[in-house]
């Protein structure tokens, strides 16, 4: 009789194989043959066949016959994710608007919208209204599998427990208002940690496994990735540098806020102006980036990452932030990390939310597969 450890190892391998096949199907989008899936996932044909059979049984994957003949003289079997199997709703709460995306099972956006608000106290009502609008656009008969809510603040074990800007929504209050609207499981996630999660997966394959991610858009956030996993910490507060008003992080937020408020623009517009050569904007961005780096010094000294990855709307300013942060680390840190700007990272928070939703939905599917096998004695 196999030991519990060997059984758990087998389950882990099956889960990994299932994720690999589904990830390949989602990335490609259209029908894929068994040979293509085996090649892309580096799995054997029998393994891919077994995974596909189980996925087809759940209804998530559908099969079809190709129009050309294979080497055996028969049309090849083709597979793809069934787009109408389920839908996913992603809601993102920013400092001045709520953004929402309704996606099908393949990750394709069905509908998207945003609603602005003027006072922080209005954010909850606006989020609920946007959720209602997007749920109403869900195709008839397609179940909503999960709603991911992206927030600013400390999230612990899926619960939003601390927020300087939205005290009326933490401690389960947001979930109480939203659950009756979406009628599906909720995932609450911190924006910077989602960005770090996505950034690590978007970096080249030879990128280091441990990085510090700095997300700078309408707000500033930090995430720590160690051995490929986002570090949460004992209280979900790993990387929450901005809670200390005595460090440079807080000063950077005030500097950006003062500069944008004075000119009636937002951070993204400021970063674009800096990238276009406006000297005053370049000066503001450089000073803010330097302050952010000073706030990160304790984390860099303790964590010793190979890279600090900057991402978000700040990519529009070019290398200004990279140079400013590098100068601080080179002056203070004995072994300074490489500072890089992640290209095409303005959507990394949304990308991270999609990845988390996909991972959780894949896990749900795998649990259903294993439950079916156990019921049938396999």
Image (cartoon, rainbow, N blue to C red):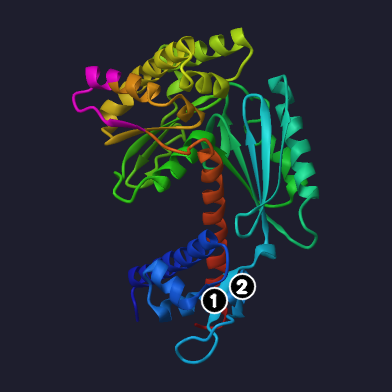
Residue 43 on image: x %, y %: 38, 72
Using a 10 Å C-alpha cutoff, classify the residue at mark 2 as few (fewer than 14 neighbours), some (14 to 19) or many (20 or more).
some
> How many numbered dots are placed on residues in this image?
2
Residue 79 in the figure: left or right of residue 118: left
Task: Please identify the quarter of the rendering in which residue 337 is found.
Answer: top left
Residue 236: in sight, yes or no? yes
Query: Outermost residue toward the bottom?
Result: 73
Residue 196 vertical placement versus 81 (above, below): above
Query: Which quadrant is the N terminus positioned in?
Result: bottom left
Residue furthest to the top in view is 262
In this rendered view, identify the residue nearer to me: 216 or 29.
Answer: 29
Q: Is residue 39 above or below residue 143?
A: below
Stretch of the chain drawn in magenta: 327-340
Mark 1: give few (<14), some (14-19) or many (20+) Cα within 10 Å. many
For mark 2, give the secondary structure.
Answer: helix
Residue at x-position 42% and y-position 26% = 318
Q: CA distance from mark 1 to mark 2?
A: 7 Å
Q: Which residue is mark 2?
A: 58
Is residue 133 in the magenta section?
Answer: no
Residue at mark 1: 54
Q: Quadrant of residue 292?
A: top left
State the image coordinates of residue 215 (x, y, percent, origin top left): 46, 30
In the displayed structure, 356 sits above or below 43; it is above
- In the image, taking residue 329 as reference, residue 348 lies left or right, namely right
**Is mark 1 in CB contact (under 8 Å) with mark 2?**
yes
Residue 11 in the image, given as x and y percentages of width and height: 42, 69
Q: Considering the numbered disc 1 on the image, is that residue within a helix, a strand or a loop? A: helix
Q: Judge whether residue 338 is colored magenta.
A: yes
The foreground one among 363 and 327 is 327
Residue 170's spot in the image, x, y percent?
63, 31
């Amino acid at each position: 009789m196999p030991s519990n450890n060997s059984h758990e190892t087998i389950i882990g391998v099956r889960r990994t194989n299932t994720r690999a096949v589904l990830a390949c199907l989602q990335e490609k989008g259209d029908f894929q043959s068994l040979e293509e899936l085996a090649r892309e996932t580096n799995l054997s044909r029998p393994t891919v066949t077994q995974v596909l059979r189980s996925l087809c049984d759940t209804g998530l994957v559908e099969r079809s016959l190709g129009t050309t003949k294979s080497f055996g003289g028969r049309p090849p079997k083709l597979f793809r994710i069934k787009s109408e199997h389920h839908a996913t709703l992603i809601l993102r709460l920013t400092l001045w608007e709520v953004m929402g995306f309704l996606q099908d099972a393949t990750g394709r956006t069905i509908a998207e919208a945003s609603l602005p608000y003027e006072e922080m106290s209005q954010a909850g009502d606006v989020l609920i209204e946007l959720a209602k609008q997007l749920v109403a656009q869900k195709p008839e008969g397609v179940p909503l599998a999960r709603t991911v809510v992206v927030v600013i603040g400390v999230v612990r074990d899926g619960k939003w427990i601390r927020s300087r800007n939205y005290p009326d929504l933490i401690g389960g209050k947001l979930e109480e208002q939203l659950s009756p609207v979406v009628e599906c499981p909720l995932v609450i996630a911190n924006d910077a940690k989602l960005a770090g999660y996505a950034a690590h997966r978007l970096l080249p394959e030879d990128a280091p496994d441990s990085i510090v991610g700095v997300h700078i858009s309408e707000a500033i956030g930090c995430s720590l990735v160690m051995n490929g996993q986002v570090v949460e910490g004992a209280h979900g507060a790993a990387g929450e540098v901005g809670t200390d008003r005595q460090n440079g992080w807080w000063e950077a937020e005030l500097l950006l806020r003062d500069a944008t408020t004075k000119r009636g623009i937002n951070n993204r517009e400021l970063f674009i102006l800096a990238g276009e050569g406006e000297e005053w904007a370049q000066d503001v961005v450089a000073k803010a980036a330097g302050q952010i780096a000073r706030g990160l010094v304790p984390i860099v000294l303790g964590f010793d990452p190979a890279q600090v990855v900057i991402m978000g709307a700040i990519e529009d300013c070019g290398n200004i932030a990279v140079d400013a942060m590098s100068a601080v680390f080179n002056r203070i840190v004995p072994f300074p990390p490489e500072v890089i700007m992640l290209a095409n990272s303005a959507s990394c928070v949304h990308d991270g939310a999609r990845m988390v939703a996909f991972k959780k939905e894949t896990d749900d599917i795998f649990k259903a597969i294993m439950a079916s096998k156990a019921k049938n004695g396999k």
